[in-house]
Amino acid sequence: MKKRSGGDELGSADWDWNLALRSAVQCGLMPEQFWDLTPAELNIIIEIHVEQKKDSQKSGIIAAFYSAYFTRLKTLSSPDLEKVLDGIDNVTGQDMTDEEMLNAVKKFAKDRG
């Protein structure tokens, strides 16, 4: 970790170095890379990693939902798939809250029977 000009390590009294190193490794960093970061830089990397993991989990849940949905259809028509793909292509870029996502899934399921 980078040091202050006085020589003492930044936040050494209240910083859990073992946890910080473990978190860095979980984010895909090598120990050498970890030691070149400031705690603020490491926190940003961890926050990004957590968001990426959440996005990956959401993608898996959405894939499972659509898999179950398409399995329940008596016949899969091209328009059904086109609507799903069109929805992916026309994403507004706004994040939904968990409640908004749940309501959207419920509405979608209700509309499809």
Image (cartoon, rainbow, N blue to C red):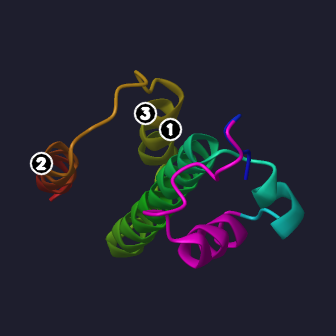
Residues shaded magenta: 6-27
Q: Where does residue 97 sit, x and y in percent of width and height?
A: 21, 43
Q: Where does residue 50 sit, x and y in percent of width and height?
A: 49, 57
**N-terminal of the two: label 2 or label 1?**
1
Q: Where does residue 41 sit, x and y in percent of width and height?
A: 63, 41
Height in image: 74 above or below 100? below
Q: Nearer the viewer, mark 1 or mark 3?
A: 3
**N-terminal of the two: label 1 or label 3?**
1
Q: Residue furthest front?
A: 6
Query: At label 2, which amino acid type do we have?
Result: Asn
Q: Which residue is mark 3?
A: 87
Q: Secondary structure at mark 1?
A: helix
Distance between the Cα atoms at labels 1 and 3? 8 Å
Q: Residue at x 46, y 65 (%)?
A: 57
Q: Look at the image and say whether residue 19 sits in the magenta stretch.
A: yes
Q: Residue at x 67, y 63 (%)?
A: 27
Q: Residue at x 64, y 53 (%)?
A: 9
Which disc number belongs to residue 82? 1
Residue sitting nearer the eye, 100 or 32: 32
Q: Is residue 74 left or right of residue 27?
A: left
- The C terminus lies in quadrant: bottom left
Which disc number belongs to residue 103? 2
Label 3: few (<14), some (14–19) or many (≥20) C-alpha neighbours in 10 Å: few
